[in-house]
Every structure is written in structure tokens, then in C-alpha cells.
Amino acid sequence: MANLIILLSICILINTFINSVAALSSCNGQCQTLNDCSGQLICINGKCNDDPDVGTHICGGGSSPSAPSGGSCQPYGTLTCNGRSHPKYSCSPPVTASTPAKLTLNDFSPGGDGGGASECDGQYHGNGERIVALSTGWYAGGSRCLRTIRITAGNGRSTTARVVDECDSRRGCDAEHAYQPPCRNNIVDGSDAVWKALGLNEDLGVVDITWSMA
């Protein structure tokens, strides 16, 4: 009888181990934290998927928010605001060591054009902080929250900034988004401090930059 109990206990342990490994190893498997996914997979929007920073394609693209290398990110629909139609994106161009983007100006303080509090920490931020919001695809379901990126302007100057929010490429034109249309899929929305660190004229509104993970 004792041997039977030991054998059953071993079987239960083996089954638990196998299920745990399978859960960690599966693409598009359910997850809550980065540790729930195995290898180079990360948790994006509740599912294990390729890490856009690493550029892996273990899951064959799947629901990864960054377009595959060499591929293109196409809009999946439009949103009409004040009589104008704006494209909606759930993806962004691939992240590289020098990712082309458009730098826009955002006010992250209460009552600013950023709308509600920053999504990463639920806080408002002063314009003296070097902080940014990234387009939905680059925001990657929050996997880049509070991480540091390096931004380089065309004048040769560069600076670092912390990711605190998503520049929503899927929704907009409501109070939560300060009645702004959805962001394009290639936006780095920077604070006043980011523009000043790069020596850029804020009156331009939008400038070409490149960025990478710092």
C-alpha cells in the first residue's frame, strides 16, 4: 500500500512538472508576468510571444505587436474624429539599433494634452522629466514600461528618456485621450525636457528621430 502511495505521488509530481514546462514553453500561452514565459518569449497582452527587443520569430509573428523584420505594419481600420478619418494600428515597425520615428511633444502633467495619468505608473509627471509615450506596437502591452530608451535627433544630439505611457494607436477622440486622434504607429511622444535635451524647436511639433533601447 505504501509503495502505491509513493508511486501515485511521483506520478502527480511528474504530471505537474510536465504541465508547468508546457505552459512556460508555449507560444501564445496565457501569462501574467515576464517569468511565465520560457526562453526569449515575453508576456505581451496576457500571452507569451516574441520579444520585439530581441527580434525573435519563435512564434511566427503571431500577435507580436511589432511587424516582422522586412515586413510592414498595416492599419486595421479607421476612427473618425471631427469629420476626419484616422488609421488605427495594433503594430509598429520593427525595433532596431536605430529605429526611425517621429518625435512629438506631449504634456504629461494634470490637464495636459496627454489626457489621463500615465499608464505605466498611474501618475502624472512634470514637464521637467525626460519621459516618453510610445506608439501601441512599441509600447508592447506595457513590456517597455519604465525602461530607458535612447533618442537621437538629426542634429546629432542624443538623450535618454523613460517610457511611462502608451501613445494609443487604436483609440482616441475621447476624454481619456484628451480628444486627440489615435497616434500613428511610429511615434515617440516626448516631454518638454526631451525636446530641450535634444536642442529642438518645440514649435516644429513633429521631427524625425531614431531611437533604441538604452
Image (spheres, grey):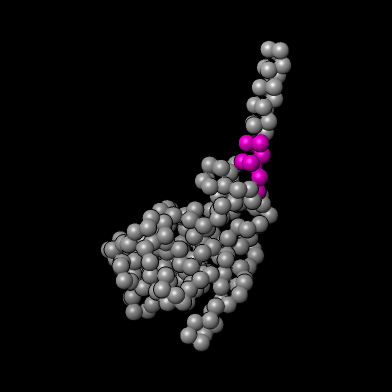
Choose between 98 and 132: the one closer to the eye: 132
In the depicted structure, whether residue 81 falls above or below residue 91:
below
Q: Is residue 97 visible?
A: no
Q: Is residue 200 inside the magenta stretch?
A: no
Quarter of the image where one finds residue 5:
top right
Question: Is 44 displayed left or right of 124 in the figure?
Answer: right
Quarter of the image where one finds residue 63:
bottom right
Q: How many marks?
A: 0
Choose between 159 and 164: the one closer to the eye: 164
- Where residue 189 appears, as percent x and y from the top left, is 41, 68
Q: Please report the residue visible at 55 percent of the width from the left and 50 percent of the height from the top.
A: 43
- Where residue 128 appears, as percent x and y from the top left, is 27, 63
The residue sitting at the bottom extreme is: 83
Q: Quadrant of the N terminus?
A: top right
Q: Please report the residue visible at 58 percent of the width from the left and 44 percent of the height from the top.
A: 37
- Where residue 205 appears, as percent x and y from the top left, is 38, 77
- Extent of the magenta region: 19-27
Question: Is 50 displayed left or right of 108 in the figure?
Answer: right
Question: Is 144 displayed left or right of 19 in the figure?
Answer: left
Magenta-colored segment: predominant secondary structure = helix
Quarter of the image where one finds residue 24:
top right
Q: Is residue 24 inside the magenta stretch?
A: yes
Q: Please report the residue visible at 68 percent of the width from the left and 12 percent of the height from the top.
A: 2
Choose between 76 and 173: the one closer to the eye: 173
The residue sitting at the top extreme is: 2
Q: Is residue 170 visible?
A: yes
In the depicted structure, whether residue 150 falls above or below residue 22:
below
Q: Please report the residue visible at 57 percent of the width from the left and 66 percent of the height from the top.
A: 90
- Where residue 169 appears, as percent x and y from the top left, is 51, 69
